[in-house]
Image (tube, rainbow, N blue to C red):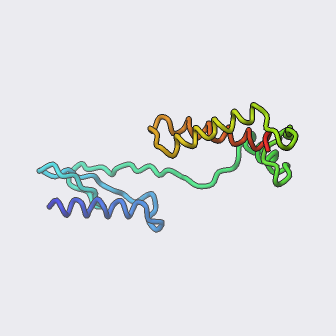
Amino acid sequence: MHAFGVLAAVAVVCSLYSPASPARTRVYRCVQVDGVVSYQQIPCGDGSRPVEIRTRHSGWTALRPGEKSLLKQYRSKPAGSPHSRQPARREPPGRESKSCWKRRKQLEAVRSRLRRGYTLDESYELRRKRDNYQDYLRQFCS
């Protein structure tokens, strides 16, 4: 009897999500004497009412005004320049500035920590620091 209830529930779920079944199909929830709940297309007995099934529409929606303006800004940027950055200041060749040396050491320490292992709480912070140091070095150091 339990297998019948499970099969009935699976059949109802499949019929609800199939494109061929309209939303107006009636489904009845039946509770048997032993407490097993089943769903079926025919009424269970006297006074049974169909279950109300709400369909949620999903899919593509139009962009909101704020999103449209962001998309226009994104499309208007020339390819290859993801950020509007100032030109990088370069030190003369052969000598690295103290700030670049310091950032390289910090980046090396973060990479070492990432290789050794870290907790879940530390993961976001370590990756953020690594990315910031790499951006700094790419922008201001050779």
Residue at image x 30%, y 49%?
Answer: 49
Q: Position of residue 12 (x, y in %)?
A: 33, 60
Q: Position of residue 70 (x, y in %)?
A: 77, 43
3 lies above or below 114: below
Left or right relative to 133: residue 58: left
List the single residue furthest toward the front. 94
List the single residue furthest toward the bottom. 20
Number of marks in picture: 0
Residue at image x 47%, y 34%?
Answer: 121
| Front one among 57 and 72 | 72
59 lies above or below 123: below
Q: Position of residue 25 (x, y in %)?
A: 40, 60
Residue at image x 57%, y 43%?
Answer: 111
Residue at image x 73%, y 43%?
Answer: 67
Picture quarter with the N terminus:
bottom left
Left or right relative to 64: residue 77: right
22 lies above or below 111: below
| Front one among 119 and 20 | 119
Picture quarter with the C terminus:
top right
Q: Position of residue 54 (x, y in %)?
A: 44, 49
List the single residue furthest toward the left. 34
Q: Toward which corner of the image does residue 16 lie, by quadrant?
A: bottom left
56 lies above or below 132: below
